[in-house]
Amino acid sequence: MVYRVEVFTSPTCPYCPMAEDVVMQAKEQLQDKMDVEVINIMENNKRAVDYGIMAVPAVVINGVVEFVGAPTLEDLLLKLK
């Protein structure tokens, strides 16, 4: 199974780079089992609205908002396995 992971960020958010780093670390471990897309809500807020995301960072896995805030690598990997 390939996981589709969307990371919603904002350029002014101090926690968004941490969330993005954690997702990329998971991608390094899972490689072709994970597709990642980083979405800047300042440029594309429609998808965030569609998911009901009110705060960033937010991590969506296969169409489900799984984390609001930066997850730990361990928590993210648990959701992906």
Image: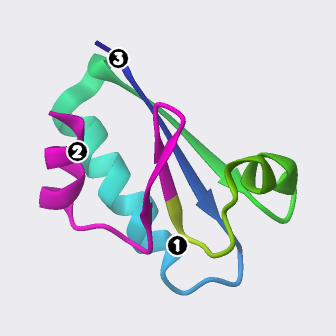
- Residue 79 sits in quarter: top left
Which residue is depicted at the point 63% across and 76% down? 55
Of callouts 1 and 3, which one flags the residue occurring earlier in the amino acid sequence?
3
User: Residue beneath label 2, please?
Assistant: 79
Question: Is disc 1 in contact with disc 2, using a CB cutoff of under 8 Å?
Answer: no
Query: Which is more toward the observer, 42 or 60?
Result: 60
Q: How many marks?
A: 3
- Residue 28 sits in quarter: top left
- Residue 40 sits in quarter: bottom right
Report how far apart the C-alphas of labels 1 and 2 lie in the structure. 19 Å
Q: Which dot, 1 or 2, sits closer to the camera?
A: 2
Q: Is residue 4 left or right of residue 2?
A: right
Query: Which is more toward the observer, 67 or 8?
Result: 67
Residues packed near mark 3 inside 10 Å, few (<14), some (14 to 19) or many (20 plus): few
Which residue is depicted at the point 54% across and 35% down? 63
Q: Magenta segment range? A: 59-81
Which residue is depicted at the point 84% across and 65% down? 42
Q: Three-letter amino acid code at disc 3?
A: Val
User: Residue beneath label 1, please?
Assistant: 16
User: Residue beneath label 3, please?
Assistant: 2
Which residue is depicted at the point 77% across and 47% down? 50
Q: Quadrant of the N terminus?
A: top left
Residue most extreme to the top = 1
**Residue 7: image location, x then y, percent:** 54, 52
Mark 2 secondary-structure assignment: helix
Q: Which dot, 1 or 3, sits closer to the camera?
A: 3
Of callouts 3 and 2, which one flags the residue occurring earlier in the amino acid sequence?
3
Query: Which is more toward the observer, 20 or 46?
Result: 46
- Compared with 15, 52 (above or below) is above
Q: Three-letter amino acid code at disc 2?
A: Lys
**Residue 39: image location, x then y, percent:** 68, 50
